[in-house]
Image: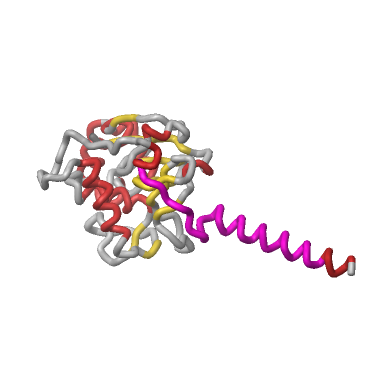
């Protein structure tokens, strides 16, 4: 009888651990909360780069959601025209397409910034078609050209959907959905094993190096 109880206890513990890790790694969906739940006002930009009647902050977020709705498959490869056109992509493409459809052509903007500030970039040969799709280059670009914001994930009111978050070797767009603590989800593309493009990862990362807003 004691052996049976012990076995059942071990099985329960194993199941709980499995469920815990599935939850932590976002294979089990996390409940989402809006800004209204935390009495946080949605940030509205004063700018509309592409003149479509939608402010930049909202436009970037909408464009990112439109991009991930195409369900891009994860693969890092070179494209002669810069932007992926075959249904594949990586983390940088979430940001690139989000900005592109809001009026910011990251390929040209990064290329111009590299030419103007080449000493700040760790680049031997400039290649417009790929330079904007490297996280290290985007760290420099956004530092030079965007509004720098808090890295404290608990300062929840200063994290807004449409913001850009940069990690040591990764990048994504901040979602307008939040977890139960008010910390926002991140819209990103990290690997081919990722189940959801929008995940509750921000508070579990210790490698955040940048948080930016375009306008």
Task: Give residue 29's position: percent from left, percent from top.
Answer: 48, 58
Query: Can residue 172 be seen in this snapshot?
Result: no
The residue shown at (48%, 63%) is 193
Number of dots carrying numbers: 0
Relative to 86, is 188 on the left or the right? right
Give the vertical position of 188 relative to 167 (above or below). Answer: below
Task: Give residue 58's position: percent from left, percent from top.
Answer: 23, 44
Query: Can residue 170 be seen in this snapshot?
Result: yes
User: Which residues make up the magenta segment?
Assistant: 7-35
Location of residue 80 (image quadrant): bottom left
For the N terminus, the quadrant is bottom right
Along the line of sight, which residue is nearer the eye, 97 or 2?
2
The residue shown at (29%, 30%) is 147
Residue 10 falls within the magenta-colored stretch? yes
Colour style of the rendered protein structure: secondary structure
Give the vertical position of 188 relative to 214 (above or below). Answer: below
Relative to 54, is 85 on the left or the right? right
The residue shown at (72%, 63%) is 12
Task: Give residue 155's position: percent from left, percent from top.
Answer: 43, 31
Give the vertical position of 49 relative to 101 (above or below). Answer: above
For the C terminus, the quadrant is top left
Q: Residue furthest right?
A: 2
Query: Is most of the magenta stretch helix, strand or loop?
Result: helix
Give the vertical position of 118 relative to 108 (above or below). Answer: above
Task: Give residue 183's position: percent from left, percent from top.
Answer: 45, 41
């Amino acid at each position: 009888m004691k052996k049976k109880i012990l076995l059942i206890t071990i099985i329960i513990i194993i199941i709980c651990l499995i469920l815990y890790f599935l939850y932590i790694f976002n294979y089990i969906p996390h409940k989402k909360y809006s800004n209204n739940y935390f009495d946080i006002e949605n940030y509205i930009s004063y700018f509309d780069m592409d003149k479509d009647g939608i402010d930049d902050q909202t436009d970037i977020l909408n464009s990112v959601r439109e991009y991930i709705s195409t369900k891009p498959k994860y693969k890092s490869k070179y494209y002669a025209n810069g932007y992926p056109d075959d249904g594949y992509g990586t983390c940088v493409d979430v940001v690139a397409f989000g900005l592109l459809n809001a009026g910011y052509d990251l390929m040209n903007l990064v290329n111009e910034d590299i030419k103007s500030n080449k000493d700040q970039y760790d680049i031997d040969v400039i290649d417009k078609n790929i330079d904007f799709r490297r996280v290290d280059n985007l760290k420099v670009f956004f530092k030079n050209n965007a509004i720098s914001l808090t890295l404290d994930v608990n300062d929840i009111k200063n994290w807004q959907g449409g913001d850009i978050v940069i990690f040591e070797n990764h990048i994504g767009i901040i979602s307008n959905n939040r977890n139960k603590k008010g910390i926002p989800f991140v819209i990103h593309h990290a690997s081919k094993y990722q189940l959801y493009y929008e995940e509750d990862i921000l508070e579990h990362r210790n490698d955040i190096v940048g948080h930016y807003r375009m306008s």
